[in-house]
Amino acid sequence: MIRTYRLGQLCLAYYCANVARFALYFNRLQRPAETRLTKPTLASPIQAGFAFCSLEHKMIVVIDDDPSVREAVENLIASLDFPVSSYSSAEQFLASSDLNSVSCVVTDIQMHGMSGIQLQHYLHAIRCTAPVILMTAYFDERARREATAGGAAAYLVKPFSSAELIGEIERALSSRESP
């Protein structure tokens, strides 16, 4: 039985065509151990303002409080042979060690606790240059303007196609690599 998680046109059934490649990747993948959600102890942006976000590893982080969306996006990114980690909240991500090696953040906007836009502002404040791709099921023009003004690499409204997400990730990563 194949479980299908829908995110617009994004389906895990898509991966059936890439089973061998996908299985090889997951044999290499080390998933982060689930940890208790605790409130992270964050340094002030001034204290934390040092070089973050190495491009060497191209770690892509997915943050969404909906497990089916999070898993579908994580699997899509993994199929591109990028290292990927996923988290159910911005706070969980900020408390992780992935903060030091992230190259791109794909996050939902409306989550419990810190929102995707608040996360974007925090990353900017600590001088993390990783592009942030925001996704939402509830389009809000004010939120789109705020995200764009804050430097969001993309603002995607669910449902969106897997090709659209892949294109935005590749665009965001290539813009970081170019001088």
Image (cartoon, helix red, strand yellow):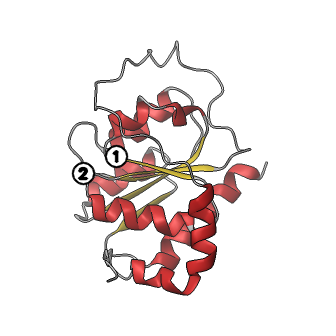
Callout 2 crowding tier (Cα within 10 Å): few <14, some 14–19, many ≥20: some
Disc 2 or 1, which lies upstream in sequence?
2
Task: Please tell me whether residue 168 is drawn above or below residue 46 in the rendered image.
Answer: below
How many numbered marks does the figure carry? 2
Q: Horizontal placement of 106 versus 39: left or right?
A: right
Q: Which residue is mark 2?
A: 110
Marks 2 and 1, how far apart at CA: 7 Å
Where residue 177 sits: x, y (%)? Answer: 74, 51
Q: Is residue 25 visible?
A: yes
> What's the mark number on residue 116?
1
Q: 90 or 19, which lies in front?
A: 19
Determine contact: label 2, label 1, CB under 8 Å: yes
Where residue 9 sits: x, y (%)? Answer: 37, 83
Where residue 29 sits: x, y (%)? Answer: 58, 54
In terms of image quadrants, where is residue 51?
top right
Q: Amino acid at mark 1?
A: Gly
Q: Residue at image x 37%, y 17%?
A: 41
In terms of image quadrants, where is residue 21?
bottom right
Label 2: state its secondary structure.
Answer: loop
